[in-house]
Amino acid sequence: MINNSALFEVELRQGLIQLGLILDEAQILQTLNFAHEFLRWNQVHNLSAIESEELFLSTHLLDSLSVVRPLKDAVISGLLPKEPLIADLGAGGGFPSILLAIALPTVQFVLLESIRKKAAFLMQVTGRLNLSNVTVEVQRVEDYSAKKPHSVDATISRAFTELTKFVAYSGPLLRPNGLVFAMKSQKVIEELKSLSNGWEVIDNTELKIPNLEAYRCLLTIAAVR
């Protein structure tokens, strides 16, 4: 539950302006409803250690929304198809995928989460927000990829695992020419040193998150052709 809904909404709208994003009123309402629902569940189920509404807004909501424009650019440039299917590996509390599904209604998302309390939240909030472009799968990534190999156009993750493992998990899921989108922090320099020779970083976009001083970037990674 948000303590000061009016202030939270004002700060959300300001953050969207700073990110250069335009959401319609229905999308803003969905985002606010998601925030209410997450914070309500978090009091009972401990989905995140962050309890401050200000930190939640910057570290979770705006951080997730910061990759909307790079994903749109990937579609415009032809790196992704017009209506891609993207898998969020270890979707957790829905960051970034639920926010991306709100902002990008033509993109389909499959959320892979093996921890049942988190998956239960994802199912609940997906239904509550009427997100027809989201499917939640309660299973481990490797089990899903064994059942549906090469079934997605891209994978994305914010805090699932370190880069080498994320790419390794992504490989069996990706269609030919599929992409890996890795949201990373300052440690990315060290992680890139261990990236397999079979993969290459084709883009590294620095993300400027409103009211967040920490370094953030989005790596776009593809298999070496």
Image: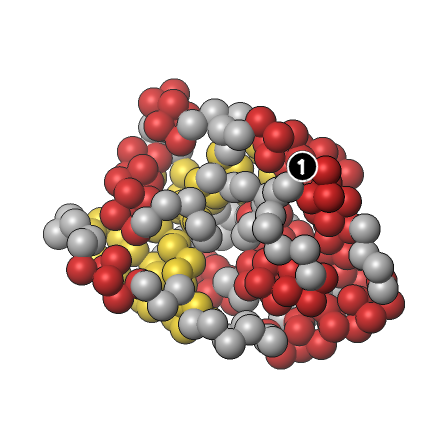
- Point 32% across, 63% down: residue: 187
Left or right for 204, reference 86: left
Q: Which residue is tagged 1?
A: 45
- Point 18% across, 54% down: residue: 194
Left or right for 136, reference 131: left
Closer-to-camera residue (210/223): 210
Q: Position of residue 54 (x, y in %)?
A: 69, 67
Considering only vertical position in the picture, is 138 above or below 161?
A: above
Left or right for 178, reference 7: left
Q: Position of residue 157 (x, y in %)?
A: 44, 49
- Point 25% across, 48% down: residue: 164
Considering only vertical position in the picture, is 123 above or below 35?
A: above
The three-letter amino acid code for the residue at tag 1 is His
Left or right for 175, reference 120: left
- Rendering quarter of residue 153: top left
The answer, for residue 85, to whether it is visible in the render is: no
